[in-house]
Amino acid sequence: MGTVVRVLLGHHGDAEVGPGLVDLAVNVRQAPLPPWLSDPVTASLSTLAAYPDGATARAAVAARHGLPPSSVLLTAGAAQAFVLIAQAFRAATHPVVVHPQFTEPEAALLAAGHRVTRVLLPPPYTLDPTLVPPSADLVFVGNPTNPTSVLHPSSALADMARPGRILVVDEAFADTTLGPSGEPEPESLAHRTDVPGLIVLRSLTKTWALAGLRIGYALAAPDVIARLAAVQPLWPVSTPALAAAAACATPVAVAAEAEIAHSLAADRAHLVSRLAEIPTVTIAAVPQSSFVLLQIPGADKIRLTLRAAGFATRRGDTFPGLGPDFIRIAVRDPATTDAFVEALKAAIPG
Ligand SMILES: Cc1ncc(COP(=O)(O)O)c(C=O)c1O
């Protein structure tokens, strides 16, 4: 694939933000760190002379998911895990990326020399496992998926597993999802040990506003984790990031995460109901995460008008399977949403 494709795949919401702009382009929650998180991170600064030791954080993350520590690999954000997988499974002959989704898995595969098959889900972007070719031996899918905000059923994902296939489920936003009765992470496969070849990726940078700290992890069978660890750089996760990982794995953190998911659901419902006031705006898929994908005729130009009005949104055309009529916006508090909706109404040519 060419340079243009790589440039488009390398575009992310952080490139859209700027001084004075309200940030609806990056799906990181905007909130101060709670003391149970900031205190250990700050305390870790007094130990920076020592090389990092991930054992405590690894054990904490494993306990959170009911897995042995050998099933956990801490990474510098989920983004590092894509690179490790692409390198560790260089021998894969038929890597498949299910789009639209976050573009870094495909970018990491291309950088490692893989030839990638794209499976493009049609609207409303729900997973159809039969679209994945049987010969696929390394498959990437997001759940919930960025940028569509669609949450796929765990049963459909588990059905995609095969002997001889590595199935990577990117759950970077799993902690933003709730089931019909309000249960957290209803479709997560994080705790599953019965799905062959499964790798679940998690990020702590979104809900916990730690994008600059770089912390996430992979969950998989110990032999798969060992293969990823073998290609990981030495000391890949800093001591403050390890402190954050341990803090975010405690019962206090898990309970706080669920509370945040509930308040996010209320903020998202407000956003959806306000957007319904604008006839030319279509919500492209049922949103179940911290962002919403919009389809609006001429969205590429509307995005620039919104920018001039002080709102940064995420362009949709760099996502395989979407196009110039799409933009993605983060769910924010109702006051920000109200101001954005007014700006959007004004930006749509009448
Ligand atoms: C779906 C998805 N997965 C993974 C990542 C990477 O997250 P991290 O900050 O943990 O590297 C992102 C970041 O935007 C994302 O949107």
Image (cartoon, rainbow, N blue to C red):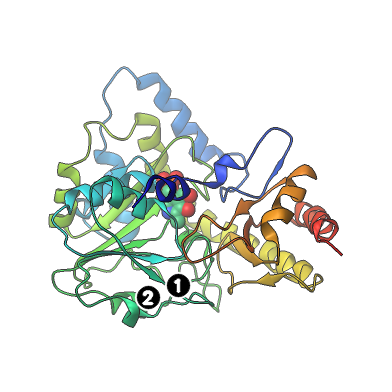
The quarter of the picture where residue 277 lies is: bottom right
- Find numbered disc 2 in the image and state the secondary structure of the residue it sits on: helix
Disc 1 crowd rating (10 Å Cα; few below 14, some 14-19, many 20+) is: some
Disc 1 vs disc 2: which is toward the camera?
Answer: 2
Q: Which mark is residue 186?
A: 1
Identify which residue is drawn at 59% across, 69% down.
Answer: 287
Q: Where is residue 53? Give x, y as percent.
A: 25, 32
Nearer to me, 321 or 235:
321
The quarter of the picture where residue 54 lies is: top left
Disc 2 residue type (three-letter): Ser
- Find numbered disc 1 in the image and state the secondary structure of the residue it sits on: loop
- Can the viewer see residue 30? yes
Q: Is residue 318 above or below residue 164?
A: above
Q: Which mark is residue 154?
A: 2
Q: Where is residue 234? Give x, y as percent.
A: 21, 31
Identify which residue is drawn at 63% across, 40% down.
Answer: 17
Q: Earlier in the sequence, mark 1 or mark 2?
A: 2
Q: Is residue 86 above or below residue 126?
A: above
- How many marks do you count on the picture? 2
- Can the viewer see residue 250? no
Q: Any atom of ligand 1 within 8 Å of the CB at mark 2?
A: no
Identify which residue is drawn at 66% across, 35% down.
Answer: 18
The quarter of the picture where residue 33 lies is: top right
Q: Where is residue 43? Give x, y as percent.
A: 44, 26
Q: Is residue 253 left or right of residue 234?
A: right
Disc 1 residue type (three-letter): Pro
The single residue placed furthest to the bottom in the displayed view is: 130
Location of the C terminus (image quadrant): bottom right
Q: Is residue 1 left or right of residue 197?
A: right
Q: Are marks 1 and 2 in contact (CB under 8 Å)?
A: yes
Q: Any atom of ligand 1 within 8 Å of the CB at mark 1?
A: no
Q: Which mark is residue 322?
A: none
